[in-house]
Image (cartoon, grey):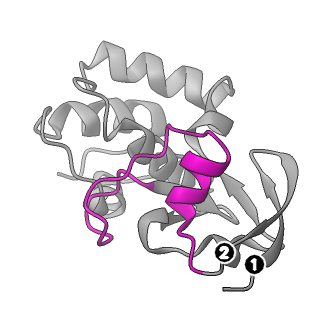
Amino acid sequence: MTPVAVEAVLNGRPVRCSIPPNLLLVDFLREEMGLTGTKQSCEVQVCGACTVLVDDQPVSSCCYLAADIDQRRVETIEGLVGTPFHHRVAEAFVRHAAVQCGFCTPGLLLTAKVLADQTAPTTEDALRQALAGNLCRCTGYQSILDALREELGGEDQG
C-alpha cells in the first residue's frame, strides 16, 4: 500500500508524517506517537475507551482511520492533562470515588470535555446521554455521574 501524507495538530503540536492508508487512529496514537492513554478494548465502537477528540468532537479511534485526521485537530488525554479542566475534574473524580481501575477514565474525561465546552447548562439527562458510549465495569456509573455533575454544574433531572 502506498503511504499517505498526514498533517495534523496533535495535542496542540503540528504533526507531519507518512502512514499506511489503513492504519487506525488508535494504533497511530499508541504505536507511532507513543500516546498510550488512548486505550484499545472492544474494537467495534462500543466501549468508549479509545475516545479522542477530532476537531473538538468525540470519536472512537478504534474505527477511525488515522489518514482522516489530515488537516484536523486531535486531542488525547495526554493533551488534556495539566489543563484547568483536567485538574478540576480529576479532583471531582477523587472526591466521588469515580475511578477504580482507570481504564475507561481517559475516554470519559474527553467526552466530558465536550460537554464542558458547551455554553448550555448540562442536565443529568444530557450527561447520561453523552456518556452512553462509555462503558465502565468498576464504578457502577453513579460516582462518575456525581463527579461530572458537580464539575459541569449539571442539574439533578434524574
Q: Is residue 87 above or below residue 114?
A: above
**Residue 74, image x and y in percent?**
69, 57
Residue 105: x percent and y percent?
37, 36
- Residue found 56% across the figure and 64% down from its top: 25
User: Residue farthest to the front?
Assistant: 1
Label whose residue precedes the other's in the sequence (2 or 1): 1
**Do labels 2 and 1 touch, CB within 8 Å?**
yes
Q: Nearer the viewer, residue 28 or 51?
A: 28
Q: Viewer-proximal residue, 112 or 75?
A: 75
Image location of residue 52, percent across then percent down: 54, 55
**Residue at 55 percent of width and 47 percent of height:** 30
- Residue at 51% x, 47% y is 110
Residue 19 image label = none
* Quadrant for the N terminus in the image: bottom right
Q: What kind of element bears circle 2?
A: loop
Count neighbours of disc 1 (C-alpha within 10 A) and say few if under 14, some if 14 to 19, many if 20 or more: few
According to the picture, the residue beneath numbered tag 2 turns out to be 20
Few, some or many residues within 10 Å of mark 2 (<14, 14–19, 20+): some
Q: CA distance from mark 2 to mark 1?
A: 5 Å
Task: Give residue 54's position: percent from left, percent from top.
Answer: 64, 64
Badge count: 2
Which mark, by number, is residue 3? 1
Question: Judging from the image, what secondary structure is the residue with disc 1 in?
Answer: loop
Q: Which residues are magenta?
A: 22-50
Residue shown at 26%/26% (left/top)? Answer: 98
Q: In the rendered image, which quarter is residue 88 located in? A: top right
